[in-house]
Amino acid sequence: MDAIQNPLIDTATTLSTHYLPLTPIAVLIGVTCLVAQIFLTLLLDKRIFPRKWQGPWNDLPGFTAHQLIAFPSMCILTYYGMRDWFYNPDKEVGNETSYDRVFGETNLSDIPLAIGSGAILIWDTPTSL
């Protein structure tokens, strides 16, 4: 497993430090979403893999793949957002008001920030064009 993880982490670190204005975890999330989009689009395309059963997932494979990737991402963002907004775990002093929560500083290694920036810049924007 280390033979796969170490080069992937090294590549993400190189991309994030030299080419993209993102953290390494954001690059990993964005690249993972992009690869999943391509794989699911090809898997669901009826011209590549003909099937007996038909459905809307075969007519619009790119849209279906996008929904399959976006739904778990939105669930994770909803969980972290609700947790941080209402329960405020281990946050610095100064995040007591809603204004501070919206416009205050955030930790650069936050998972919601990584999902939002990595997924939007590397996966969502290019595949939605």
Image (cartoon, grey):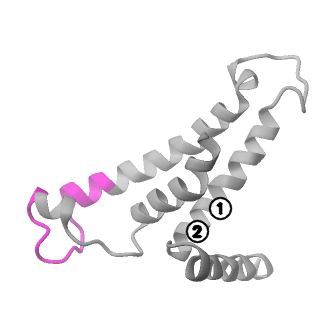
Quarter of the image containing the C terminus?
top right
Is residue 15 in the magenta section?
Answer: no
Tell me the CA gap for discs 1 and 2. Answer: 6 Å
Which circle marks residue 31 in the picture? 1
Q: Is residue 66 above or below residue 25?
A: above
Instruction: Specify the quadrant that holds the N terminus.
Output: bottom right
| CB-based contact (under 8 Å), mark 1 and mark 2 | yes
Label 2 amino acid?
Val
Residue extent of the magenta highlight: 81-98
Residue 60: image location, x then y, percent: 70, 26
Element under disc 2:
helix
Horizontal side of 49 relative to 60 (left or right) equals right
State the residue in front, 123 or 72.
123
Compared with residue 73, is residue 121 higher up or lower down, i.e. above or below?
below
Determine the secondary structure under disc 1. helix
Residue 75 horizontal/vertical position (percent)? 44, 46
Identity of the residue drawn at 78% across and 33% down: 44
Where residue 16 appears, x then y in whole percent? 57, 77
Q: Would residue 129 appear left or right of 45 to someone viewing this image?
A: left
Residue 27 badge: 2
Q: Is residue 122 left or right of residue 112?
A: right
Disc 1 marks a residue whose amino acid type is Val
- Residue depicted at 50% across the width and 72% down the height: 22
- The label number, if any, that marks residue 116 in the structure image: none
Q: Position of residue 85 (x, y in %)?
A: 22, 56
